[in-house]
Image (cartoon, rainbow, N blue to C red):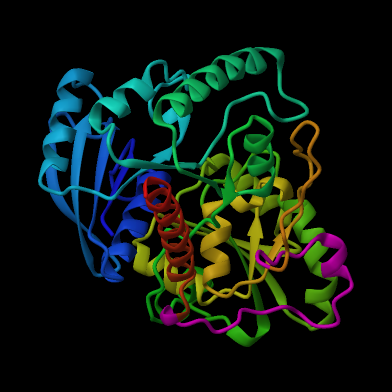
Amino acid sequence: MKIAFLCSNLEPGRDGVGDYTRRLAGEFIRQGHPSLVIALNDWHIAATLIEVQESDGNPVSTLRLPSIMPWKERIVEARRMLEGFHPDWMSFQFVTFGFHRKGLCAGLGGKLTAINSRTAWHVMFHELWLGLEEKTPFKHRVLGGLQRIFIHDMIRRLRPQVVHTQTEPYCQVLNREMITASVLPLISNVPHVAGDGWTGLLEPLLTDSDGQRPERSKLYLAGIFGAVHPEWKAEQAVKVLLPLVQKFNKRLVMVFLGRNNLTPEKFKALRSILHSRADVVSTGERTMAEISQILQSLDLGLATSPRQAIQKSGSVAAMLEHGLPVLVTRDDWHLRGINTQPDETSFPLLSPQQFGLLNTLPTREVVTAGESRLKRVAGQMLAELRAKASTIESGRT
């Protein structure tokens, strides 16, 4: 089976959906299913770029079309890329703000069908429209209403045979909108790379100014990966963690990993607030290999996203894929009219209440690269595409 993936951007490490799409395409290739990726609205480049990008050791052929290029030319270039490939499926990895700064994707469906109107379409909704949350401001509801209209137009034109999203609440919203959808779990954008994230990466950060190295056995490392949502309160997480951490005579360390939105002033203030209760360190931006190794050196992951939206957090997916238990302290975001919570059998999380009932500190499970969630998710998607293709073929005979 041949899959042509379409997304908005493909600058490595700069676009979550692009990184996701590359990894998924690479896994399909690894499993013997030729795939390529086309970025239709890449604002990181100024001219058309054809290149081979690497994902988990798999070469992925890509076409990157700049956002400044007229859409007519982009359509021509995309069709040219597909001419010799003859895909069995077109997989559109959709996020509305990837195509317009206000998420207003007027006419996008027509552009996509102009690229390929003969092949069956698959759509993955990474985001829906604004205005779904209970506390959404009125202006966002108005903007979201327009986004919803354009999304419905896109679906009407594409007539996708398979529609996915990564969260149960989003799935219910789509089905309520008469768009038949099912859940395809989010994958981590951080490949599992063996290595020692403590000795070479974290230990130096925690070494005192006098050169005194910390004893790993006396520390409990809780990691925050990626962007920190402003609604998340570090003090609340510390309040939940500290009683059990102190019970076992350990020192709590908050590790902020990767690129986040904390200014130096905010980080300094956080250190000052927590200094008597926890150490606070930041690794700064790191390579994917270093991030994987650091995740493997932690004891616990801390989610800054709210519980109902946790299934679409790439940071949480990365922590879970590396065996970390994840504490979720926020439950302040709810879709209007939908009270669905994540299925904890497939997406295990710890609430503050659950953490408070533990008799021992949770720690990371040892996970190897061979147990990758990516393989399972790609396998699920492949099975669903095959089943639908078989149904389509049966209908023709």
Indicate left or right for 133 with 7 as reference.
right
Q: Is residue 327 magenta?
A: no
Indicate left or right for 355 with 363 as reference.
right
86 relative to 343, above or below:
above
Taking the view exactly as shown, the residue that stands out farthest to the front is 397
Indicate left or right for 194 with 347 as reference.
left
Q: Which residues are magenta?
A: 346-370
Task: Return the x and y of residue 348 as percentages of the image width and height.
Answer: 69, 67
Total tally of numbered discs in the picture: 0
Q: Residue at x 46, y 73 (%)?
A: 372
Q: Main secondary structure of the magenta part?
A: loop
Of residues 17 and 12, the one nearer the viewer is 17
Task: Return the x and y of residue 379 as percentages of the image width and height.
Answer: 44, 67
Task: Return the x and y of residue 183 as percentages of the image width and height.
Answer: 59, 52
Of residues 252 and 8, the one nearer the viewer is 8
Q: Is residue 350 magenta?
A: yes
287 relative to 66, above or below:
below
Q: Residue at x 67, y 23 (%)?
A: 131
Dividing the picture into quadrants, the one containing residue 32 is bottom left
105 relative to 62, above or below:
above
Indicate left or right for 79 with 169 as reference.
left
Q: Residue at x 15, y 49 (%)?
A: 85
196 relative to 187, above or below:
below
Q: Residue at x 41, y 48 (%)?
A: 392
Dividing the picture into quadrants, the one containing residue 94 is top left
Of residues 184 and 96, the one nearer the viewer is 184
Question: Can you see residue 22?
Answer: yes
Q: Quadrant of the N terminus?
A: bottom left
Question: Can you see residue 225?
Answer: no
Dividing the picture into quadrants, the one containing residue 144 is top right
